[in-house]
Image: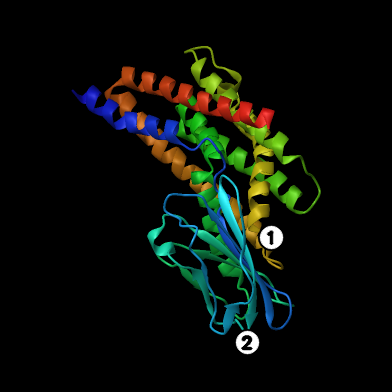
Amino acid sequence: MIRWLLALMLVPMLALMLAMPLAADTLRPGYVEFTQITPTDWQLSWKLPVQPDLSPQMRPVLPHGCAIASAINRRGSATALVSDAAVRCSRSVAGGRIGITGLATAQTDLIVRVAPLGRAVQMLRLTPARPLATIAARAGRWQVAASYFGIGIEHIVFGYDHLLFVLCFVLLLSDVRRIVVAVTAFTVAHSLTLVGTTLGFVGLPSASVETVIALSILFLAVEVLKKQPGQPRLSERAPWVVAFGFGLLHGFGFAGALSEIGLPEGEVPMALLAFNVGVEVGQIAIVLVGAGLLTLVRRMALPIAARFIRWSAYAIGIIAGIWFIERLIG
C-alpha cells in the first residue's frame, strides 16, 4: 500500500517534467524598458511572454505626468509580444510609479529597466503581488542586489535546461554533500564565463552554446541510466569535474539571458554577484528537495525509487534529445 502511495506521489513529478515547454531556458522574462532621450522625451518598450495568464492588451502604467505620444508598434513571435512607443513627460519621473496593468492576475514576474539621462540605470521587479514599482531619484546598490538575487533564483528554477542539469546530479549521486559540491562547481564555472562574456573577454555563438547545453543534459541522463553498483562512471567518480566543465558552457547561456534583461550601469559587479548567489541558492534548494524526496523513497520502497530514477532519466533524456535536434537543425 505504501509503495503504491509513493508511486502516486512521484508520478505527478514525472508528468511535470514531460509537460515542460520544449523551449528551454524560459526565463527570458518579460520586461519594461523606459529610456530617456531628451529632458521631456522617453522611449518605452515592453515585452510580454506568450502565456495563458498574460493578455497582449496589458499595457504599462507610467509615472504621473507621462503619456504615450505616438502610435504603438507591435511585433511578435511564438514566445513573446514586443511593443514600442514614444512617451512625453512633463515632469521628473523620480518618485513616480511604473508597472503593467493586469499583472496582479498573472503568474509571472517582470523586469523594469529605467535609464534616465546622465544617471545610473535602475532595475526594478514587478510581481503579481506588487505590479507597480517606484522609480528612485538615484539607483540604490541594495535595490540592484535584491532584484538580481531574485532573477538568479528564478533563472535556475524556471530555466528548464539548467534545472534538468542539476536534477541529473540528484538522480546520479546519493550523497547530498557530493551533489552540493558538484552544483557549486557548476556555479563557479558558469560564473567565470558569465563575467567573462559580460566584460567582453570571451564569447561564443548562442546557437552553438544552446546546442551543447542540450547535449550536456543528454550526457548526464545517459550516465544515470548506465549507472551500475560497484562500477562508478566518470560522473560518479569526479562529479565536480563534469559539473565544472559543462558549467563553463552553461555560463554562456546565462549570459544570453542576462543580455536580454540588461545590467545596471555603475552596479554591474553587484548585479553579477547577486545573480550568481541567487542561482546557487536556487540550486541548493532544488538539491535538498530532490535528494530529500529520493532518500525518503529509498528508505520506504527501494524498487519504486530505482524505477522512478530510470523513468526520470528517460524523461530528461528525451526532452534533452528533442532540444538537441531542434537546436542543431536551427
* Quadrant in the picture for the C terminus: top right
Where does the image place residue 311, in percent across and percent down from the top left?
41, 21
Direction from residue 164 to residue 118 in the image, left or right: right
Q: Which residue is mark 2?
A: 90
**Element type at mark 1:** helix
Q: Relative to 196, is 133 on the left or the right? A: left
Residue shown at 33% from the left, 28% from the top: 11
Instruction: Give the side of residue 222 with respect to residue 249, left or right.
Output: left
Q: Residue at x 51, y 43 (%)?
A: 283
**Residue 203 location (% of width, % of height):** 78, 43
Q: Which residue is mark 1?
A: 269
Find residue 227 and report its horizontal and vertical position in percent: 50, 16
Q: Quadrant of residue 137?
A: bottom right
Whichever of callouts 2 and 1 sits on the residue coming sooner in the sequence is 2
Q: Residue at x 61, y 43 (%)?
A: 187
Quadrant of the image occupied by residue 292? top left
Inspect this view and state whether residue 288 appears. Answer: yes
Alpha carbons under labels 2 and 1: distance apart = 34 Å
